[in-house]
Image (cartoon, rainbow, N blue to C red):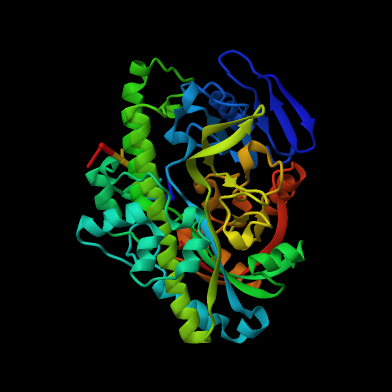
Amino acid sequence: MDISRTGPYELRVEQQGAMRVPGVVYATRELLSDAGQSLEQVRNVATLPGIVLASYAMPDIHWGYGFPIGGVAATDPAQGGVVSPGGVGFDISCGVRLLAADLSAEELAPALGRLMDALDPVVPRGMTRGAVWDLHEPGELRRILVAGSRHAVERGHGDQRDLDRCEDGGAVDGADPGQVSERALERGLHQVGSLGSGNHFLEVQRVDAVYDTEVAEAFGLRPGQVCVMIHCGSRGLGHQICTDHVRRMEQRMPHHGITVPDRQLACAPVDSPEGRAYLGAMAAAANYGRANRQLLADAARRVFAQLLGAGLELVYDISHNLAKLERHEVDGATRLLCVHRKGATRALPPGHPDLPADLRGHGQPVLIPGTMGTASYVLTGIPGGRAFHSTCHGAGRTQSRHQAARGVSGRELRDRLEAEGIAVRPSSWRGLAEEHPGAYKDVDAVVEAGEGAGLCRRVVRLTPLGVVKG
DNA sequence: ATGTCC
């Protein structure tokens, strides 16, 4: 590979062999910790039919299924551009929702333990156990797949503002439940309103630093304020959809005359039966993910209201695992592109028409979940943002789950966090150990690189007061 | 991430 550093926060992978475009990686030397495996994936993505401008990677790049996590690639359907499930990931529409409480950390302090004890039993989590909704017939599930958090709000679990402040108004267009397999539907029935496991969490946080007071105020955030951050995805339903459609595309690639350097890059033209089928199913999983976060937010709201008499206003809800059809200007012409973001977050600039009216002057809130026990961030998109208005999505792993669990016991980690004043309500000791902060990159360095690279701007830093761990 | 291998 011909790799050159083009700036403190930028690498270029020159176009070679089957690559159709170069690779552009926004990261410091320190952040590239996995010995070039993920750079090979950047190069492989650059071979996809119809790819436009470059195969991009964000500062939290690490090795993933097919695409690197932190990968961004846009293809042009009018030029044979493909969609690849590996460019979205197994956890379709994994994302983050941030709510701001009308309460300061000082006011909360005496009640923090009681708050965490009250959240513990009402936030379903772990691999298989329980959910806010346990559906028994697929009719309501199909409604969720089409209407996303709009359905939860129609059932009384939220209000219009929740929809206004959610990406795509609470539901993405084009969902096609007919492309969701029976098995995926079965898996989805009993998991609506659940965190899952791994790096998913519900945290009670405090606004620790404000970098831009005007934008923070527009987002509804002030120093010392209590927030709730929810990080989760589309559970077994999204996983099954990815599995089903990768298999189907693998079988059909010869028919489309597509070859890829890694079978995990299975893909199909956006304008093909397989491409449309995947995008319809993917949109359904995206809506499931939003309904999931809406119900968990509603559960947290009930606890805050009952115990503290405090409200929780939605700041924003944004996915970091999704492909979307978006209009972008390329070489002076506006084109409709299929933008894959896998472990990368959309970051719309001020003035963008897709932003809610009350945020339009300030840019999109970009929500970055940290690792348990470390900071999280709110960023915003900037004019001229690179990589089709995208930025990082979080810290990014440096150790495997197995490695991480060897380093520390769950109980030891809980004690360490509690000693730092962070209340922890785990779902399993093993799961807790796998998520210890040392297994991840430094989220502060990731965010600094994102700003340095011209992808986004910092607005607010949040630190954890209590963690309900998936 | 994931009923961590139909």
Q: In the rendered image, which quarter contains the N terminus of chain A? A: top right
x and y percent of residue A409 in the render? 53, 60
Vertically, is A410 above or below A457?
A: below
Nearest the eye: A366 or A447: A366
Q: Is residue A124 left or right of residue A200?
A: left
Vertically, is A344 above or below A427?
A: above
Nearest the eye: A326 or A19: A326
x and y percent of residue A171 in the render? 42, 54
Nearest the eye: A325 or A308: A325
Can residue A235 be seen? yes
Q: Quadrant of residue A62?
A: top right
Q: What residue is shown at x 51% (from left), y 27% (from top)?
A: A76
Q: What residue is shown at x 77% (from left), y 29% (from top)?
A: A5
Vertically, is A82 above or below A18?
A: below
Q: Is residue A422 left or right of residue A254?
A: right
Can residue A421 be seen? no
Residue, far left: A137
Vertically, is A181 above or below A95?
A: above
Q: Quadrant of residue A130?
A: bottom left
Q: What residue is shown at x 33% (from left), y 69% (from top)?
A: A155
x and y percent of residue A85 in the render? 42, 35
Q: Tally the numbered discs.
A: 0
Residue, far top: A17
Q: In the rendered image, which quarter contains the C terminus of chain A? A: bottom left
Q: Is residue A224 left or right of residue A285?
A: right
